[in-house]
Image: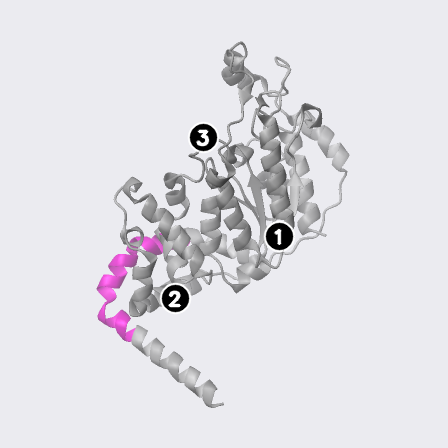
Amino acid sequence: MNKFFINVFALLISTFIVGIGVFLFKNEILNYYDKSLESLKKTNELQSDLESGKIVVFGSSELLNSNQKFIPQNYFNNDLKLPLRVQGNEGHQEFVILSQLAALENEKVKENAKVVILLSPSWFTGNSDNGTKIPKFLEYMYPGMMNKLYFQSSVDDKFKILINEYVRKNFNLIKEPGYIYTHTFEEFKENYFDNQIKKFIINVYENRNKISQTVSYQKPKFDYEALKIEAKNFELPSNNNSFGINNDNYTKFIEPTVNKEYFPFTIILPKIEENQEYKDFLLLLELLQNYKIKPLFIMQDLNPYIFAKNREEMNILVSLIKSKVEEKGFEYFDMWSYKKEDYEFGVLTDSVHLGELGWVKVNQKIIEHFMQ
């Protein structure tokens, strides 16, 4: 009982100190948080969706083709009337996905979040300069998210330090960096009083705007084989080439290269110890291991008729990625074609992005994994 009263007393004292601090320094605090609070509005929606159990699909450029019938944001929300969120655009790779999840980590997120990670094989390619680029990081880790990471998230400090080190490494590439980007995590951590004020303000702001709700799913019943036939009818025409990609993409990007010596294209991979995207992938697995609902990883494909050279080496990397996901007990959907005979026309609409048939397969896996 004494311990209880001591804890209550400590809470009251800390609340009183924070209140005094807010009163004495309210102008400085409000000036600092003017832009940060504004950008916090963007964090609330994603955090709320993760906490509520809404399916959130993280990916990159494949999510941008909003005209496709079976792309998840269209098919789930419009056809199935099942709530689903997609998060990402071109260049939205594993380190910035990790950073967002780290910033928003709390007990509700770890308990309820239903996360899908769309892996693009192209993320892991290149000479030795792959990995998330700083402009894309800043697009999603804006001041509001960085404040949540440092002053509210329950994530292990290891990830806060990791993200801070990434910022420090790329600091010279940040144009007019604000306060939240200019200091090391250790400097933030040393200022306990200031941290408590920031945490207090974030909590007050979010509690004022938060709407609590839980999303539940009932597994829909339909004929997947019939959907696959329908998907092929919706796919853009592919009758001017033998590679199974849509006519416009072939004419614009592939046809000019067909008679060149470098066609079909070579998949370039750095050594595994130098592959930054692979390192980020391992860190993302580590971050997600405390989630109650196991995440779903989906490995997409590169058209084997277009990306044919050095495919054997990529096969080894994809197999390694698959093994690492399954070691954690997570679900893995392998859409990679290890040889040409494995590839089904229509899965991709061009050389790298999912077509209507590919999305039907993805949607089926999402439903089977999260709506049992």
Residue type at tag 1: Lys
Q: Is residue 79 magenta?
A: no
Residue 220 x, y percent position in the rendering: 72, 46
Q: Which mark is residue 328?
A: 1
Q: Secondary structure at mark 2?
A: helix
CA–CA distance between discs 2 and 1? 37 Å
Judge by depth and name the residue closer to the eye, 84 or 309.
Answer: 309
Does the image show residue 354?
Answer: no
State yes or no: discs 2 and 1 in contact (Cβ < 8 Å): no
> For the point 51% across and 13% down, which residue is it?
257
Mark 3 or 1: the one toward you? 3
**Quick check: 100 above or below 10?**
above
Mark 3 or 2: the one toward you? 3
- For label 3, the residue is 127
Q: Quadrant of residue 343?
A: top right
- For label 2, the residue is 204
User: Which sits earlier in the primary sequence, circle 2 or circle 1?
Assistant: 2
Q: Quadrant of residue 161?
A: bottom left
Residue 5 x, y percent position in the rendering: 44, 87
Does the image show residue 344?
Answer: yes
